[in-house]
Amino acid sequence: MTVRMGFVIITSRCIDCDACMVACRAENDVPIGKTRNWVKSSGVQGEFPKVKEVFQPGNCMHCDHPPCVSVCPTGASQKRPDGIVIVETSKCIGCKYCLTACPYDARFANPETGKADKCTFCLQRLEQGLKPACVQTCLGKSRQAGDLNDPESVVAKLLAKYPSRQLLTYVGTGPNIYYIDDVVPEIPEGN
Amino acid sequence: MSKVYTWDQLFSRRQFIKGAAAGAALGVSAGLGFLAPDNMFAVEHSALKTAANESSELQKVTTICEQCVWRCGVIAKVDNGIVKKLEGNPDHPNNVGKLCPRGNAGIETLYSPDRIKFPLIRAGARGSGLWRRASWDEALTYTADQMKKIKDKYGAKAMMFNSTDNLSQPFFEILLKAYGSPNYGTQRSLCFNAMTTGFLYTYGVPQPGTDYKNCKYMIFAGRNLAEGISNNETQEMIEMIARGTKVVVLDPRFSKTASKATEWLPIRPGTDSAFFLAIINIIIKEKLFKKDFITTYTQGFDDLVQEVKDYTPKWAEQKCEIPAATIERIAREFAAAAPAAIAHPNWRTSNFKNSFQTERAIAVLNALIGNWAQPGGLIPDQEINTAKLGVLSHPPFPQAQGIRLDGVPWQYPLVPLSYGVIQTMRDNILSGKPYEAKGWLISRQNPILSIPERQKTINAFMKLDFVAVIDIQASDTAYYADVILPESSYLERYDGLIPIGSKIFIRQPVIEPLYDTKSSLMIYKELADKLGLGDFLPYKDERDLLAKQLKPFSITLDELEKAGHYVVPNFKKDHSKDFEFQTSSGKIEISSSIMAQMGKKAVPAWDEPPRPPKDHYYLLTGKTAQHTQMFTQNNRWLLEVFSENRAWLHTSVAAKLGIKTDDDVVLESDVGKVTIKAKVTEGIRPDCIFMVGGFGHVSKGLKSAYKLGASDSALHKTITDPLSGSSALSETFVTVSKA
Amino acid sequence: MEITWGILIVIYLFTAGVSAGAMITSNLALLLGGNDFERVSRWGAFISPFPISLGLGVLLLDLGSPFNFYRLFMTLQVRSPMSYGSWAILLFTLLSVVYLYLWLPQKFQIIGETKSLEQWKKRLAKVIPFLSVGVASYTGLLLNAAARPLWTAPLLPVLFLVSALSTGAATVILFSALSPWQRARHRELQLLTKADALLIVLECFILLVMIVMGRLSSLSIAEAYGSMIYGQFAMIFWFLIVGLGLIVPFSLEYLELKEKISVRWTLPVTIGSSFLVLFGGFFVRYIITFAGQWSRWF
């Protein structure tokens, strides 16, 4: 089976500490003022004292049908065979079409290079057998990443066991971040 | 006379951008560009390597974080002398491989353009921001001369020393003892003195651990682990919640911990002891306590039974505004889970004059269910089970002359000498009673922003003859100093070794110092030399000291540096002393002998806290996960994830005043007034205003943080719990208005 | 999201439309009107290369990596409207320059024989309209392809096409009415004005259909159109587009066509109405660009 890299994010384990955002900045030299990933909050919902708040980390969804790739006029935006969506910066002209095309607003124009910039799944780390920086540092083990098609991967095992949801599926992007809202007592061992 | 600099000239950004770090920063992102999808990893790696300046094996150096005081293990990835990435050390028990946002942002602390790059001596009026560059020799000689002058003229006691919770603190303490001053200030009284004294006088242990792993029922009443991150404990809390442990959070504000908890109880500020006394009432009334444990290990149970008789849940509901039925239910659930249940000792429960009583009630509640040294309960002191480092012998310290300025113990008999009461020290600098203070040596502390009533603290600084500050950046306190001795950042220096259990960890430089800075170890040492006290710190350099600390173990410093830590072989845990309580009675003191001696009520009792007058609100302060006290607000990476503090207002209050989120509001207390952005939320009691502390810096040397947000210390009144010495921060009430 | 496509892109979208519209006006005037409409045809030909060149210029300025511009023309990405659109615009711009040359007075036509040039003029006029329609509507497809709620409307290319024709015609009216040289005749202007008025009606209709369809669509799309009709973009929509850009110029043109305007006022009214059409056309691009980026899925 082909490799299909993706994320599983367990929202019940996120405390919105934003370590993932800082770790990504360090790992990928993301310029100040921009970010490749995020933690969104539902805001405090309900009425005092019956309130709740949910945190939802995110980054590029490495979609099955990425609009950012199809709109790219130069072929700089690409979906790799392993599913990771990247920007080949030498081809990028900085038209920002992909930025407007991403329904998750996962891309930004890098002010230092003028080119489109986004989550690369920390390719440089994958190559060394490491997890992406955001996953590595996550205090709550909320962020998980791996090959969704490999039944021995942590992400596949989690998806097999818990119900999950994706964001904006009706837009037709086929996002590869799966959110688990249920309580997950134990993170399975796996690739 | 050399050139006089302003802050702007000293810390021009250009200087930094030209530096190596920025060039390297461009490397990786450019490198990634050459990626082609067909040749997957290979191309990309070589591109990366080329971009990062051909040579390089990425070097990994193990060290210890200092973005807060938790001391997490760090593995630094260093590429050609540039720190590229910090990651958690999986072998370190304090963080088991993870770093929090602050730990991840250590690189920005290191490469901050606002670092102090060489010693500075004040060249204008104090606080004018005019400085001249000095050599280390000149700066240290100047500092030593001033300190000698003060000692000769007014006695050693006229010189104050200040430092808290860092790895080189023991050596700072040696310096001050060798100098002979009794005046040692820490930030403890602004933090959790009530907790440490409360537990000290109950169990003989200031801060017992908590076994999250096996705990089945947890009550937090001032420990916000999701925002006051203590890395491994925060991780354990998340696991605990994921496992389904019942977690009850008492907090007037809907903190992130509360959002994760099973149950949030928005308690009226200052009334936590009513809640806990009522829990005790139910546990006693319904005989849910552990009788054997109480008989064997405690004293004063009968007095407690008498005292809590009237503290019924109904009574408590009037005080703390948590329904009586809820209190009863929690009491029963808590007792049912015993001994795997914990009423957490907490940190920030020390906010009222009655907080010592609150902490005593919490300590006693734990004793009633007998969770001491049980799985899922409180963990006895770890001191005995910690490897012992080699010590340096030095001459006997001179007798400290005179009483302490901060009233310990003559005004605050219960407060340990090593904690002190810094707000009283400040007040007595101003009053000149019982004697005039003349000089202050401050290492890595920022009293101007931390002590309540900032203006008073500034006035106290202006009154002194001499102020020297050791810091890595121009903190607000450094801004008002006469001499700044720039410390190397934690990624550029050694500190004393850290034993944790059977392991010994090292903080070591991961790169050479970027600037003309020194480690505190060497600053203290060289200052001691100039003061003629060199014998008290008998080491040549840091490595010499560390080698001496390592002497008892069969490992060399070189080996330790390479390995990052050392496991003492055959280290056996000793649990034989778990039930030897270091109290006057040798038992867990439900009834405190010391309190009885002082003629005070010896069992935990209710002490009515003040309430805000009409149109006033409780001012609450607390932490955020993205910043450490007043230390990280100038870290631009952290400002990216938490840009400034805001005043939380309940929706109903905001509606009444016509305030929307992001509007400027004015908060005014008896002692000060600040303008701050509003955050309107349902997640706070309508009678409270909350703000994250540590913002509102006054130092122009902190370019990014200067004037960002507002300072809580500008609003806080100086109110001290006479028992614990704790600063009763939440007894400050404020009015709110639209700016 | 933050607005990544700003005013420069609006100018680009607008000028591409003006050029295409002016070109079509010229082509049709030549093919259908012959000598009677020579002045209008000539003005259309003279105008059309310039707005789009300006547009391409500002587009270049908007690029983060302008020196990489050539990369656009080293590939054809069939799924990317910007890719095939760039080729279309390149071709259009080149042809519009050739077409302009063919309309130059004889003394400037250094290359070619007058007669064959005349033939080429006709031939080109038959071909270019297809390309022009492509250029005018491609900007709509461009936005269609970016998955944003406001931009999903299938009528967007049609709206841009109609707006292009309207603004193109208005530009020709403006120039040929103002020019001291080769000034258009009353009959030419009358017909163009009539066409323009019809286009305005058509544009209103398309906008109405888009809004109704949008409001009846999913929550995100309904919200996106809401931002135009009562949200943060409502002032621009109702005042600048519907009022000043559509109703006022239509009314003026209507009065002109009904000959309710005294001769003394004809010229200022003609100028005024065509200017307002351009003004409205610009803000149509503006509102679609900005409100589109502001709109999000939820």
Image (spheres, coloured by chain):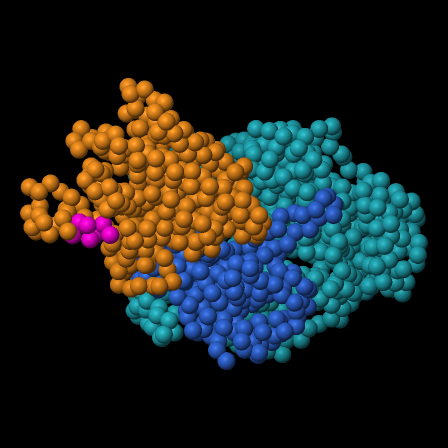
What tint does the image give chain C?
A: orange
Tell me where residue B167 appears, x and y as whole percent: 54, 58
Q: Is residue C260 above or below residue B295?
A: above
| Residue B179 versus residue B558 in the image, above or below | above
Q: Quadrant of the N terminus of chain B?
A: top left
Number of marks: 0
Is C121 inside the magenta-drawn segment? Answer: yes
Q: Tell me if residue A39 comes above or below residue B548 in the rendering.
A: above
Question: Residue at left 38%, top 44%?
Answer: C162
- Residue stretch in magenta: C120-126
Horizontal side of residue C193 vs B248, given as left or right: left
Residue A71 showing in the rendered view = yes
Front position in the image: B169 or C69? C69
C110 relative position to B611: left or right = left
In the picture, the quarter occupied by the C terminus of chain B is: top right
Q: Is residue B347 magenta?
A: no
Closer-to-camera residue (B499/B77): B77
Give whichever of C59, B564 is nearer the camera: C59
Which hue is chain A drawn in?
blue
Q: Is residue B45 visible?
A: no
Q: Which residue sits at x=46%, y=36%?
A: C237
Q: Position of residue B492 (x, y in %)?
A: 42, 59
Q: Residue at x 68, y 64 (%)?
A: A183
Left or right relative to A164: residue C167:
left
Is B89 placed left or right of C73 in the picture? right
**Colour for chain B in the figure:** cyan
Query: Which residue is at a point 43% across and 65% down the rendered structure image?
Result: A85
Q: Residue B316's x, y, as percent?
A: 85, 44
Residue A90 image offset from top left, x and y in percent? 30, 62
